[in-house]
Image (tube, rainbow, N blue to C red):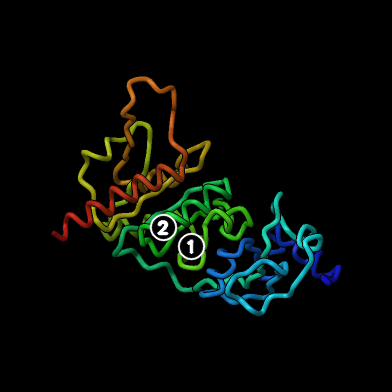
Amino acid sequence: MISKSTISLIASLEHKKYRDRHGLFVAEGVKLVDELCTRLTPYAIFATAASGGSNDSSTVVSEAEMKKISFLKTPSPRLGIFRIPQSSTSALPLPGEPTLALDGVQDPGNMGAIIRLCGWFGVEALVCSPATADCYNPKAVQASMGAIAHVEVRYTDLPAFLCAATAKNISVYGTFLEGKNIYREPLSASGIVVMGSEGRGISPEVAQHISQKLYIPSFAACCGVESLNVATASAIVCSELLRRRMDSKK
């Protein structure tokens, strides 16, 4: 049986201030929880009797109890509470590999999807402005599909980070409606790509450090779509940047 204090703790972890206070976050789903267990330290794991999964240290709970602690409309049979990894206090190193930076991306689902694509493309570090959605938001964790355990997410003063990069002649790219066709522009294999927020795009403070404005063209004659979802756009830009990197090594 789950105690009232545990139920209260889990409920509080839906909010960032309590995640920060306790240093904990929630993940739901058999595959997701088991994947996180391979890299992160579990604080507690709860599972229904028929949940399966590879972790044998779960506290067995009833389906009714799982409904009380789940953030999902249809609860998964397994829920884990994990300790948030301690972020490095050292200054962010300037990249030698393609790097993705987020400037105020607000939607946790987009945040999680971007973390997932970083894991897919082998982008090991994701640099974010403080205004960017918390990567340990339950929706972000779910959308990351376990990549949150493999991608280092660092929140920092983004303009200062980009200023240091440009001082070292590292290319900084950003996506803009007035940018140049990404498929025709020369791209550095180790540049930084900045993606802006869903509604406002890249902020003026960050835009002044962009060395090259890029645009993902539409190939439809008439589609009525003004722009791409930020996670989709991030995937296209990362794919193109890494394709160029592979071509440069041939």
Drawn side of residue 2 relative to residue 38, left or right: right
Q: Nearer the viewer, residue 24 or 73?
A: 73
Task: State yes or no: discs 2 and 1 in contact (Cβ < 8 Å).
Answer: yes
In the image, what residue occupies the spot 16% across and 56% down? Answer: 248
Q: Nearer the viewer, residue 239 or 128?
A: 239
Element under label 1?
Answer: helix
Q: Which numbered disc covers residue 236?
A: none
Query: In the figure, residue 20 lies in which quadrant?
Result: bottom right
Query: In the figure, residue 76 lies in which quadrant?
Result: bottom right
In the image, what residue occupies the spot 74% across and 73% down? Answer: 60
Query: x%, y% of residue 91?
Result: 43, 70
Residue located farthest toward the right when viewing the structure as drawn: 4
Question: Which quarter of the image is occupied by the C terminus?
Answer: bottom left
Query: x%, y% of residue 32?
Result: 56, 64
Residue located beneath label 2 in the image = 118
Drawn side of residue 183 relative to residue 177, left or right: left
Residue located beneath label 1 in the image = 147
Q: Earlier in the sequence, mark 2 or mark 1?
A: 2
Question: Which quarter of the image is occupied by the N terminus?
Answer: bottom right
Query: x%, y% of residue 103?
Result: 48, 48
